[in-house]
Image: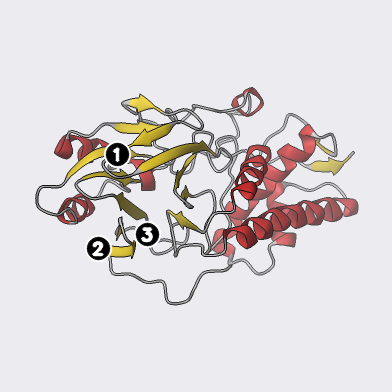
Amino acid sequence: MDEPAGFNPPVGVVQRPEPGLRMVLAPNPSPMTFRGTNTYILGEGDVAVIDPGPDAPAHLQAILGALAPGERVSHILITHSHVDHSALAPALSRATGAPVLAFGDSSAGQRPEMARLAGLSGGEGVDRAFRPDATLADDEVLHGAGWSLTALWTPGHMANHLSFAWRDAVFTGDHVMGWATSMVSPPDGDLAAFMASLEKLVPRQDRVFYPAHGAPVTAPAARLAGLIAHRRSREAQILQALTHGPATPAELAARIYTDTAPALLPAAARNVLAHLIDLTERNLVGPDEILGSESRFSRR
């Protein structure tokens, strides 16, 4: 993990990472969200809110309180529809009159291969009720008062995940963070898509990434390279572990994630399952029966 130890902003208090940008931390710290959700406010006058966060009345008031007199919210942008990102959007929209914009609802962008795996359980934190007022396409440009953003479709952590490019910065949601690697939990998470989305950002050579959890990533190229290498290393570990015989995702997670707290091993097993689905699609491994989270997988 590459998180600076000093990242611990006070909840609900406006931070100014750089000119033209504000951040307000939501009150939802957890092992999966780190200090909480970073809600970004872009621009001055007519502003965009990126990831309003969890449905917490205190956070709604903190966002509204971060606005200067006479300012208004013109856009509410959602990177993806997990409840720690999108659940506050309806209340913020009612309070401000701003439309909610996203790639689509919680099933938007899902590959047919993943949609067929709907019985895999998962679905941790998915905002099933989420419906944006309008959808954004990959590479669509949004213009505001003194700012513009380009929507980048970056599926993987979730199929409807968008990142937003602003000049030489990118708001990366849960796609790229410094404090941890992203959770990829099938069928909402898709490892093949996640890897392609990491590769998609490599040529951009951005100055900074602003994630939805944790501190800004100030060396994006190095972080992308590290995440790609990490996932390839995990794949190699899984294949090596399977040389000793068939195993379930949970068994593989216990063998591979040796430095992970026991309470987080179920999440690790979901990441392993994402790798196993990808390896199955590439005909490198296969389940002993219909593919599922309890299946035993073997090398081909």
Q: Give the label on residue 31, or none.
A: none
The residue that mark 1 highlights is 144
Q: How crowded is mark 1: few (under 14 residues within 10 Å), some or many (20 or more)?
A: some
Q: Name the kind of residue labelled 3 in the image.
A: Gly
Q: Name the kind of residue labelled 2 in the image.
A: Val
Question: Helix or strand or loop: what does disc 2 sit on?
Answer: loop
Of residues 78 and 253, the one nearer the viewer is 78
Q: Answer above or below: position of 76 versus 253.
A: above
Residue 295 shows up from this direction: no
Question: Helix or strand or loop: what does disc 3 sit on?
Answer: loop
Q: Answer above or below: position of 112 versus 123.
A: above
Residue 140 figure quarter: top left
Q: Answer above or below: position of 271 versus 118.
A: below
The numbered mark, 1 or 3, whose residue comes first in the sequence reads 3
The residue that mark 2 highlights is 14
Q: Residues within 10 Å of mark 3 (few under 14, many from 20)?
A: many
Q: In this view, does 52 lie to the left or right of 166?
A: left
Q: How is the image coloured?
A: secondary structure
State the image coordinates of residue 130 (x, y, percent, origin top left).
36, 31
Of residues 148 and 240, the one nearer the viewer is 148
Residue 88 figure quarter: top left
Residue 35 figure quarter: bottom left
Residue name at image x 43 percent, y 43 percent: 125
**Of discs 2 and 3, which sits in the foreground?**
2
Separation of residues labelled 1 and 3 (CA atoms) = 27 Å
Separation of residues labelled 2 and 3 (CA atoms) = 14 Å
Q: Name the kind of residue labelled 1 in the image.
A: Gly
Residue name at image x 66 percent, y 26 percent: 113
Question: Given the current orientation, which residue lies at the most extreme front position?
Answer: 146
Q: Give the label on residue 36, or none.
A: 3
